[in-house]
Amino acid sequence: MSHINRLHTRANVMLLSSILCILSLPAAAKQGDLKQELKIASVSQSADIKNNQIVFNGPVTIVQGTININADELRAFTPENSTSKRLIATGSPATFSQELDDGQIGTASADEISYDLATTTLTLTGNAKLDQSGSQVTGNRIKYNINAQELIAESTGKGPDRVITIIQPENFQDETAPKQQLPEIPVNKQIKP
């Protein structure tokens, strides 16, 4: 492999590493993960230097700290002079997980997990599911903009397919807040005539 090819491959791996860092689930992801080595295990890999693309064929396992991605195929695109740098993991399903600072595990799974670096948008397509601290969102497609913290979940609109959101009680109740008491209702004293 020529020196230029090694540089392109190294640049693609560095892009993949930075994408994994950004993919970290939004709620208190382990900060130490971003400083860990990135290990990609696959059956085979190919680099298309001309088109700035690396394809890992699987099963593919990516580990960086507590971040784990499992897929049948992983493609990393880095087109020159473009803002459409992307990482696409496909599988039955492709999965993403990371330990959060509180020890909980956040997970995502879908037939395709796509991340657009320019827009910081994570898109889960086909049997999409996000799960964090027992609360989850499922649908055909889930799109999450990490910077804007905007989530859109959609169904196919056919048959019984629906977007389902499950929120665990401990995730929306603040146990440290004082319990609200009902105001006392004054009892009218009866006055005798």
Image: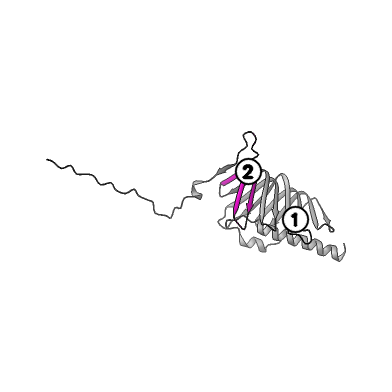
Q: Residue drawn at (83%, 63%), measured in percent from left and top?
A: 6
Residue 154 is labelled as 2
* Total count of labels: 2
Q: In the displayed image of the protein, which residue is found farthest to the right?
A: 2
Give me the residue at 64% from left, 37% from top: 157
* Element type at mark 2: strand
Q: Nearer the viewer, residue 140 or 69?
A: 140
Mark before the other along the chain sequence, 1 or 2: 1
Q: Is residue 114 above or below residue 35?
A: above
Q: Residue 75, percent across and down?
A: 76, 52
**Type of colouring:** one colour
Q: Nearer the viewer, mark 1 or mark 2?
A: 2
27 vs 61, nearest the viewer? 27
Question: Closest to the observer: 150 or 30?
Answer: 150
Q: Which residue: 72% across, 54% down?
A: 62
Residue sitting nearer the eye, 44 or 163: 163
Q: Main secondary structure of the magenta part?
A: strand
| Residue at figure coordinates x 86%, y 66% from the top left | 3
Point out the image quarter for the N terminus: bottom right
Instruction: Determine the secondary structure under disc 1.
Output: strand
The answer to which image quadrant residue 191 occupies is top left
Residue receiving disc 1: 40
> Which stretch appears magenta?
132-158
Label 1, label 2: how far apart the Cα atoms are: 31 Å
> Is 20 placed left or right of 53 in the picture?
left
- Residue type at mark 2 is Glu
The location of residue 154, given as percent across then percent down, is 63, 43
